Image (cartoon, coloured by chain):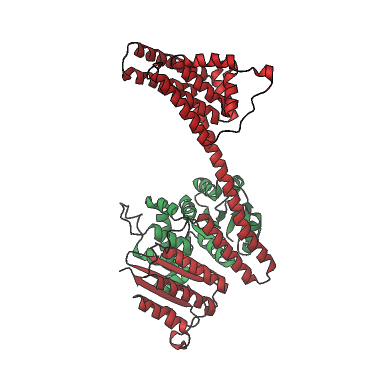
Chain colours: A red, B green
Amino acid sequence: MIAGLAGGIAARLGVSTVYVRAAFLALALAGGVGVLCYVVGWLITPDQRHYGSLIVAEEPPTTTQRIGLILAFVAVLIALDALGLWFGPVVWPTVLFLFGGALIWDRSSAEARERMARFARPSEGDQPRSRTQIFAGVTLMVVGVVVVLASIQSFQSLGPVAIAVLLTTAGFMLLFGPWVWGLFEDLSDERTARIRSEERAEMAAHLHDSVLQTLAMIQRTDDPQRMITLARAQERDLRVWLFEPARGPAGGSVREAIGDAAAKVEATFDTPIEVVVVGDCTLNDRFTPLVGAASEAMANAAKHSGARTISVYVECSNESVEAWITDQGSGFDPDTVSHDRRGIAESIIARMARSGGEATIISEPGEGTEVHLRTEIR
Amino acid sequence: MTTIYLVDDHELFLSGVRSELSERFEVVGWSTDVDTATDEIRKARPDVVLVDVHMPGGGGLAVVRNIHETNPDIRFLALSVSDAPEDVIAMIRAGSRGYVTKSIDPTSLADAIERVASGDAVFSPKLAGFVLDAFSDTEPVEFDPELDRLTPREREVLRQIARGYAYKQVATRLSISVKTVETHVSAVLRKLQLSNRHELARWATERRIV
C-alpha cells in the first residue's frame, strides 16, 4: 500500500496480499521488526517500473505449502520472542485478530468487500446508524489499545489484558458485525437457492417419469376402464410422493402394507379400491397374514363381484387389528363355493386361523360381500 | 329446485360439474376466484355452494369463512383432489357441512348436495376415518365430555360409513332409520366443528395423508 512490497511478495508466494500485510503488521508490533523488514525489503527489491514485471504470479500454493508458510511465520515470531524483541502477551491475540480479519476479507465476495468498504466511508452513509457505529467501534478499539499499553507498562498480569481484548473484540463486532452477519446471510441465501433449484429439478424429473408417461399412455388407450386405472395409479403414486413423509424403517406399518396391497390389486384388476385406515401399528409377523388375507379378499372382490369399487377399512386399536373388505357387487352363497376355489378357504380363512386370528365372510347373492378379518395384539 | 353455486379455479372441472348437475339443480352462478365468489354468493344466496379447497387467494377456506360470517344459512360442500387431513378438518371447522373428493361419481355428488341442502352432513369414507382417528380414545386427555368424545353409536355409524356403506345401508345394518343415521352424523359434524380437543389439529398435521 505504501511501496507495493506486500503486493510483490504476495504475488511471488501466490497468496492474497492481505495476508502479507497482516504479517507485516504483526511483526511491526513485535518490537518494530515489521517496520524494519518493510523498509529493508523496499530498498533491496527491484522496482517493477524499472525492470518490467519480473514477478511472475505463481500458482496458488497447495494446502501443505500454506501450512508451511504459517509455520514459518509462527517460527519467526517465536524466534523474535527468544531474542527479547517480544512486545508482550498482546501480540498473540493481535496476530490471531489480524489473520482472522485477513481470512474473512480474502474469502468474501467482491460485493461483500464493497459493503465492508462502505463502513469505512460513513460520509456516503445511506445507513444513518453507521457513523455512530464506527465512532463507538473506534472508541472501543482505542480504549482497548490504551488499556493494553497501560497494563504492559505497569506489568500487570492477564486481567486488564483480557478486558482489553474483550473491548477490542466488541469494537470489532460493532464495526464489522453487520458485515460479518451479511456474510452468513449470503451463505444461507445461496444454500436456500441451491436447495430450491435441486428440488425443482427433482420435481421435474419425477413429473416427467411418472405423470407425463401416464398421460401419454392414457392418450394411447381406447379402453375407458384402463384409463381410469392408469389415472388412479398415477394419482396414488403422486399423492404418496407429495404428501407421504419418507417411509419408516424396513418392515413398515400396517397402514403402508394395506395401501401397497390395494395399489397392486387395483393395478391388476382395473378396479378402484377405497382404503380407509384408522390408527396404525408396526407390521410384524403377527399381522403379515392379515395383510395377505386382506389382499386376497380384495383380489377376489375385484375378480368376481363385478362391483364398481371396493372398500377397505382397517382399524388398529389397542386390542386388535381389524380389516373389513366390502364390495356391493354380485355376492355369493359361501356354502356353495366349490372346494377347488382355494382362494377363500386357504388364503383367507386358513391363513387367518394359522396366525391366531379369525376371518368371517358374509355374503348373499345380489347383496354384496363383506370379509372381516381380526387379529388380536396379544 | 335446489340452487347451487360453484367455485373452482379449474375451468375444465367447473364446466364438467356444471353440465352434470344442471339436470337436478339450478346452477345460479360460478366463479374461479375467491373475491368474485364472495361477492356473487352474497348476492345470489344459493342453497348450497360447491367449493374447491385449493385455490389461489386463500382457497375455498377463505370463501367459506367470508360467507359463513355474513350468511350462516348458506351451506357448503367442499370438493377437493386432496385428502390431506389438515385440509379436510380446516374446511369442516370453517363451516363446511361436508367434504368429498373430486373423484366422486356424478350421482353420489348430486346426492351429497341434496343432503347438504337439507341441513345434513356428508361424510365420505375418508372423512369418517379421519374423525375416528382424531377422536380415538387411545390418548388420555382432559376433555369436554359433551364435545370431545363420540358416543358408541356415533362411532359405530362412522365405522359403517368408513367401510363404504351409504346412509341407507348403514341404517339397515344397524336397524335404525336413515333419519337417525343423519342425526348421528350431524352430531359428529357439530363436535368436529366445535370441539377444541387440541389433538385434532396435531393429529391432522401428523397424518398428512391416508
Answer whether residue A78 is visible to the viewer in this image: yes
In the displayed structure, does residue A189 sit left or right of residue B169? right
Vertical side of A162 occupied by B30: above or below = below
Vertical side of A125 occupied by A179: above or below = below
Q: Residue at x 31, y 17 (%)?
A: A157
Q: In which quarter of the view is residue A223 placed?
A: bottom right
Point out residue A146 in the picture as x, y percentages from the top left corner. 40, 12
In the displayed structure, does residue B61 sit left or right of residue A255? right
Q: Residue at x 56, y 38 (%)?
A: A190
Q: Residue at x 60, y 66 (%)?
A: A230
Q: Residue at x 68, y 71 (%)?
A: A222
Q: In which quarter of the view is residue A271 placed?
A: bottom right
Vertical side of B115 occupied by A160: above or below = above
Answer whether residue B57 is visible to the viewer in this image: no
Point out residue B27 in the picture as x, y percentages from the top left corner. 62, 57
State which quarter of the image contains the N terminus of chain A.
top right
All told, the count of numbered labels is 0
Residues A53 and A87: in front is A53
Point out residue A161 in the picture as x, y percentages from the top left corner. 35, 18
Point out residue B25 in the picture as x, y percentages from the top left corner. 60, 61
State which quarter of the image contains the C terminus of chain A.
bottom left
